[in-house]
Image: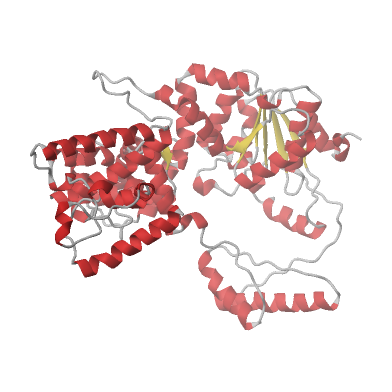
Amino acid sequence: MSFLDQLNSQQREAVETTGGPVLILAGAGSGKTRVITYRIAYLIENRGVMPESILAMTFTNKAAQEMVERVDTLVGGLSIAKPVISTFHSFCVRVLRRDIEQLRIPSAVPGVPPIGLTKSFVIYDESDQQQLVKSVMRRFGIDDKQTTPRSVLSHISWAKNHMLDPQEIYLQSGDPKTERVAHIYEEYRKELRKANALDFDDLLLETVRLLKAVPAVREYYNRRFQYVMIDEYQDTNRPQYELMLLLAGAHHNICAVGDEDQSIYSWRGADIRNILEFEKDFPEAKTIRLEQNYRSTQNILQAASAVVSNNLKRKGKNLWTSRQGGTKIGYYEAPDGENEALFAADYIARYLRQAVDQGENARAAVLYRTNSQSRLFEEAMRRYQLKYHVVGGFSFYERAEIKDMISYLKVIHNPDDSISLLRVINTPVRGIGKTSIETVERVALETGLSFWGAISEVVKRQLLPQRALAALKGFTSLIEDGRAILVGTYVERLQETAREEAEAKDDAETGTPPAAEDIDFSPDNFSFDFGPAADDRSGTTPPPELAELPVIKQLFRTPLAAPPPPPDAALPVITQLVTTALADWQ
């Protein structure tokens, strides 16, 4: 039995129509995901298409993963190669990691690297974006209480989704607030480039710019992907639409799947005209309607159709289902939020009691539009002694310690990432305070360097007290150690460090007084005796294997910031440190 026998006539037509552009208008619950996955399987198994020449893009990781699993179930054993099934943004990251440096512009100054983003770019999440906008607003003297960073980012995202640059926003502005947003947008974009960073909207924009500007790259992807499928086409914005046209190439084997009646994301840039005018972009396109609903009863379907039929911009479908009848839809208009929540809790309590009496294991769900409504519903559920579970919560990756660790890894990967660098430069506390950071920021503005580059300039020009300079040197050394481990040159870096320490020791023996921050704290010079005999360096030193532990090395490399403590105060601290290190070593 072929897997095609599991499809209805409309679904089968959509699966078997593989040549040229196809628009599949898939009503709610009509088996849209099944059609896409079966179409991929049909191309591989029945048409002999190489799996790697098929590209399918959707909007969420969950939807993409579900497609991957379904396709693997259907044709997983036929080939080692796999079709590319991903979200729009994941696909764009792949493209940019491979080819973004094709957009770099050669520098006119000899010895200066090309201008533009590199493959090691970082991606800023919403928190990083807000921090960057805050810093730009602070620089412009804009109060973030009157104009919030979140609202500014919303304006910037809207502009990017409509492919408008800061100059166009400024020219279209009709009030001072929009003018301010345009200025912030311009500076925000500059800071992103300086940090070798992109935000999520940039992933789409830069990919489109790359495919337009570099014909060789565009032709490579046109040759590779002979069949392109777009899910949830009604929710695509202008950059995603442009991306689809560029990937379609000359073969036009593009399949767009969507439902104009489910277009709900116009507030974030989705353009319903993309699906309504598909036939204008591809006059030879074939339109197929999936109209059988497998999810809902007849009552629900009729009510939904009655509402959506009032939409002015639609192509129209006649949805039907074999599940006749069904529970009638209820409607209740509450006078206030508290009454609304109590009504819902009372209705659910009665429903669950009836279900228990009938021996059913029933469940209920409450959907609300804003998180602020959660409290009222929770209080109502508690009053009725109903157990409940709130879906969502604090993300693991939003925890402070996890964001700190990720920020360290980002800085090691890309030191020009100023937002991540500012998060960890004094975490844990290492003596780099507000004054030091402001000095580095000022130098960065004066020189046009990133924050990382400005640190070296501050150290070189000795713009801070010795203790602060030593702290900056320690931090940069830590990051450089991480970068050396990343690229596999850590051994060479250790050898270089040892050579520099040996040269410093030779200078000391010849009478050249070292600077306070360059005092050698190597294991050979360490003593546990803080008494009179400490000066003759004859005290006990840790065993060689212990001396190689990172915690001991860090202790020896720490610059001298204060006179040694009294023997009674210092000994317990040293003893505890060595005991802990020895336990780790064993």
Q: Judge left or right: residue 242 versus residue 105.
A: right
Please say which color scheme the image uses: secondary structure
> Residue 517: horizontal and vertical position, in percent?
17, 47
Residue most extreme to the right = 1
Q: In the picture shown, does residue 578 fall above or below 333?
A: above
Q: How many marks?
A: 0
Name the residue at 82% across, 57% down.
298
Query: Is residue 332 at least partly visible in the picture?
Result: yes
Q: In the picture shown, does residue 496 fall above or below 395?
A: above
Name the residue at 31% across, 33% down.
495
Camera-side residue: 204 or 255? Answer: 204
The quadrant of the image that shows the N terminus is: top right
Query: Is residue 448 at least partly visible in the picture?
Result: no
> Residue 39: horizontal and vertical position, in percent?
76, 32
Name the residue at 44% across, 58% down.
583
Q: Quadrant of residue 378?
A: bottom right
Q: Judge left or right: residue 296 versus residue 585.
A: right
Q: Quadrant of residue 326?
A: bottom right
Camera-side residue: 458 or 297? Answer: 458
Camera-side residue: 166 or 530? Answer: 530
> Residue 169: horizontal and vertical position, in percent?
35, 40
Camera-side residue: 143 or 547? Answer: 547
Q: In the picture shown, does residue 525 fall above or below 394?
A: above
> Residue 417: horizontal and vertical position, in percent?
35, 41
Name the residue at 55% across, 17% down.
219
